[in-house]
Image: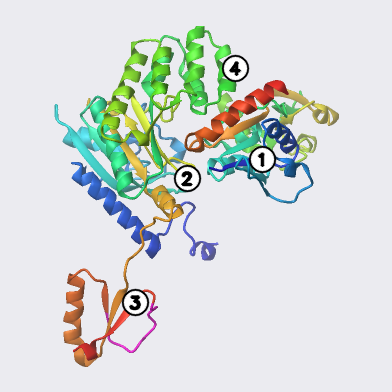
Amino acid sequence: MELTVALAKGRLAKFAVDLFEKCGIDVSELRGDTRKLVICDKKNEMKFVLVKPSDVPVYVYRGVADIGIAGKDTLLEEGLPLYEMLDLKCGKCKICVAGYPHQKERITSNITRVATKYPRIAKMYYDEKGEGIEIIKLNGSIELAPILDLSDVIVDIVESGTTIRENGLTVLEEVCDISARLVVNQVSLKTKAEKIQPLIGKMKKALEDM
Amino acid sequence: MTEKLKKQVPAGAWDYLPEECAAKRKIENEIRDNFLVSGYQEIETPSFEYYEVFMHDSVPYVQENMMKFFDQQGRILALRPDLTGPIARMTATKLLSEGKVFRLCYIQNAFGFLNRGIAGKTEFTQAGVEMIGKKGADADAEVIALAIGTLLKIGFDGFKIELGQVAYFKGLLAGCGLDDEQTERIRALVDAKNNVELEYELSRLNIDTEKKTALLELGSLFGGPEALERADLLAENDECRAAVENIREVYDILCGFGYEKYISIDFGILNNFNYYSGIIFRGISDGIGTPILSGGRYDELLREFDADAPATGFALGVKELLVVLERQGKLPKLSGKTLVVRTDRKHMAAAFSYVQKLRESGKRALLELSDENNYDPVLFETIDFKKEA
């Protein structure tokens, strides 16, 4: 029985490689500068696929990958039913609302304009507050939006807050905490239990030692 | 724009081309036969209902998932998001009488905007049963056994039915004084087996440590009968114990039927929690990452229609079944060739009655009066009738 793991390309992949190595899985091929998208550890019957971070939940939800490592932000944004079984405590940051502390009053605009690359998270957050908003979906340099008056606030990931501060913005509200998570397909957890359960146990232990 | 749209189907709508449609119909017929010979009567309800049928306290339907339109008086109509609501309405208002048990089945389409996944379609076929008027583990076991028997009949083997019990979770939370919002947050975290955030959520609540431990254990209370033992140990009150006892009874009956290898237990399954009142179950299979069937007991639902009757049932996703069967190389295929009886106008009377005879004997046959010969020899076998006569 082969286990397929979806890994987010980039920073999170490095951490995942360290973690899997500590669990005794051969992921040396992932360390090099490989262009391969599929890497196998035949001995442990594991297959690793490297995908865009925001695609990890989709691969796991649809069952083409049994487990995956993804940031909580992408999990929230995709909103798919998955088992979220471990907090890997890596890539810790927050999703925040940021903007200017004193917003100009505008007669012609009484709905907050929110620029974000997380439209679903922004919508959920303001829905919970019972506040209607206008979402402006951007794909990068979100901080620019309030500066150019494209939006009133932004909803974005804040790590140290430096980018926010350097652009003259302030964190106004904290939405939620973010870190990397281990997600498992709801069917695979049961149909491949004898492989997944021990692996989760090993990962848990490895995390404690890290 | 209209030029471009007229060649497409709306998002999530689906054409069943001949091969898939033939397989679908074959599977549906096998399912229907199995329901009927098990003593369930087939019914049909309208494709659309008044919105109110789906929008009250004890339903899992989400407003934005439903396809809605208006009747001539401006009242809201909705395409049914599943069959359970309509069947509860129909049974409560037209069938139900004291002490009687109704075993009903259906193969019908349901609709919803939000369906995702491999077989996620906005219009999808469900094959299911509802047993209304009977309580207890034997009724629960009967419908689960029917689900297993039906899957076996259509050629499934690598599947499991996972049993859960919402009453256990409800029992654990009884007397904790949590409001609906807090309960919902805890439910969602247990259902996602997200113990990291569950622990944090629980740490902010004023409930006793034993309960917290039990709630944190819920997500890992799955597997074979040993999960029942652990659930029993963690049981807080009579409600929890009764819930465990119910699953144990159902489990024992199904083992008695020889279905042990198809059953597993998971107390952490808590989807559609407002709808269900007791045992819940879902079917999972190799070859697909989403459930192929789901069901459970919903004793409160008929009250919404001013009737009081316990009920249980399940629905199979027909498209999901087709996807798994194809992946396992078991999708039913059309057998044999279609016969083409070739003749001319002079012999057509005799040829026509010959073709009719073939059809009566169950063969697929068609009559060709012209010289046209674009029949694929893989699919068709030509008979020259002039020679035969």
Q: Secondary structure at mark 2?
A: loop
Amino acid at pointer 3:
Phe
Of the numbered discs in the image, which one, if any, rests on residue B351?
none
Where residue B242 sits, quadrant-wise, is top left
Do marks 4 and 3 both belong to one polypeptide chain?
A: yes
Image quadrant where one finds the C terminus of chain A: top right
Do marks 4 and 1 both belong to one polypeptide chain?
A: no
* Host chain of mark 2: B
> Magenta segment, which residues?
B367-377
What residue sits right under mark 1 in the picture? A7
What residue sits right under mark 4 in the picture? B200
User: Looking at this view, is A105 or B276 the one in front?
Assistant: B276
Residue A186: x %, y % from top left: 50, 35
**Is residue A56 something that shows in the picture?**
yes
Disc 4 to disc 1, C-alpha distance: 26 Å
Vertical relation: B221 (above or below) A51:
above
What residue sits right under mark 3 in the picture? B380
Amino acid at pointer 4:
Tyr
Vertical relation: B166 (above or below) A52:
above
Of the numbered discs in the image, which one, if any, rests on residue B288?
2
Q: Is residue A15 magenta?
A: no
User: Looking at this view, is B337 or B348 the one in front?
Assistant: B337
Amino acid at pointer 2:
Ile
User: Looking at this view, is B318 or B242 the one in front?
Assistant: B242
Crowd rating for badge 1 (residues with CA inside 10 Å; few <14, some 14–19, many 20+): many
Q: Earlier in the sequence, mark 4 or mark 2?
A: 4
Residue A19: x %, y % from top left: 70, 31
Disc 3 to disc 1, C-alpha distance: 50 Å
Q: Are marks 2 and 1 in contact (CB under 8 Å)?
A: no
Q: Earlier in the sequence, mark 4 or mark 3?
A: 4
Do marks 2 and 1 both belong to one polypeptide chain?
A: no
